[in-house]
């Protein structure tokens, strides 16, 4: 065998900046992140087991798998930030607990998830009252609203597609989301609309809804990607939709 010479990459370039923990059942978030992140961003993903049916009990069960999922990132990598891609799971488990569980197995400068990211985005945009449109059954969504209320964000207007099966969430099409959002926002005294769930296909409707509603539209994947980029000083892709990214460009 003939040995070949090689050189190591320069220190400081060898680790990806971003880590993303994706639900086993999620079909949407990775494609959304490829559209939202700049081409220069380096990021890795791992997956966490998730039940096919979304209930408070199945979401809470993810707590027992988060450290193991974080432990599947390549050994020795230090991240600038790791994001956990589950809005309702974070509300159920708790943001502080999510952070603790991830840090047990992965080295990272910061941890975030859609709930903390949403709170940060609302503060940045001075949003105090949200309409929330969720795909999930009421018991799951109610926990999210309670967590937001604890952070000083009211959600007086709420709507749901009343879906329990995760696989069905990714099949809800854009026109259905637009129609439901317009119905929900009709006469609503709120500052913005939040489309909850990282598996809901929302990116293609954000600009159109902002035009029709004349108010900001936030989504789980928008706020999570925005918050992760804020943590490490990245700018979004030039084609990222929505007022949140327009103010960050």
Image: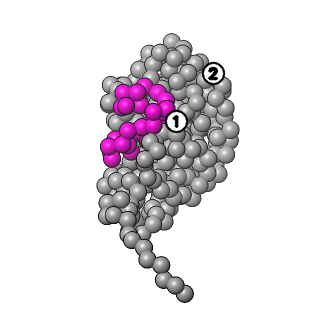
Judge whether residue 222 is colored magenta: yes
Residue 119 is left or right of residue 51, and the answer is left
Q: Give the residue drawn at x 58%, y 30%.
A: 204
Question: Residue 109 at x, y = what percent?
Answer: 31, 55
Q: Quadrant of residue 9?
A: bottom left
- How many residues crowd around disc 1 within 10 Å: few (fewer than 14), some, or many (20 or more)? many
Camera-side residue of 177 and 100: 177
Q: Is residue 5 above or below residue 78?
A: below
Q: Give the residue drawn at x 39%, y 71%.
A: 7
Q: Quadrant of residue 67?
A: bottom left
What SS does tag 2 mark? helix
Magenta residues?
A: 220-249
- In which quadrant of the rendered image does the N terminus lie? bottom right
Q: Which mark is residue 179?
A: 2
- How many residues crowd around disc 2 within 10 Å: few (fewer than 14), some, or many (20 or more)? few
Dot 2 or dot 1, earlier in sequence:
2
Q: Which mark is residue 196?
A: 1
Q: Is residue 74 above or below residue 129?
A: below
What SS does tag 1 mark? loop
Q: CA distance from mark 2 to mark 1?
A: 16 Å
């Amino acid at each position: 065998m003939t040995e070949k010479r090689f050189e190591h990459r320069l220190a400081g370039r060898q680790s990806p900046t971003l880590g993303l923990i994706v639900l086993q059942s999620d079909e949407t978030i990775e494609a959304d992140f490829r559209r939202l992140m700049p081409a220069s961003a380096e990021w890795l993903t791992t997956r966490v087991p998730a039940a096919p049916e979304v209930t408070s009990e199945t979401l809470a069960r993810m707590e027992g798998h988060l450290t193991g999922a974080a432990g599947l990132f390549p050994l020795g990598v230090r991240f600038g930030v790791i994001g956990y891609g589950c809005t309702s799971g974070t509300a159920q488990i708790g943001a502080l607990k999510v952070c603790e569980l991830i840090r047990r197995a992965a080295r990272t400068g910061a941890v975030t998830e859609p709930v903390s990211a949403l709170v940060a985005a609302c503060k940045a945009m001075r949003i105090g009252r949200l309409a929330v449109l969720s795909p999930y059954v009421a018991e799951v969504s109610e926990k999210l609203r309670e967590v937001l209320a604890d952070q000083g964000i009211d959600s007086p207007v709420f709507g749901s597609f009343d879906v329990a099966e995760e696989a069905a969430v990714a099949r809800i099409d854009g026109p259905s989301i637009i129609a439901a959002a317009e119905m929900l926002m009709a006469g609503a005294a709120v500052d913005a609309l939040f489309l909850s769930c990282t598996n809901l296909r929302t990116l293609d409707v954000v600009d159109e809804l902002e035009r029709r509603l004349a108010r900001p539209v936030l989504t789980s994947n928008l706020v999570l990607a925005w918050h992760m980029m804020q943590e490490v000083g990245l700018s979004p892709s030039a084609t990222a939709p929505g007022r949140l990214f327009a103010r960050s460009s």
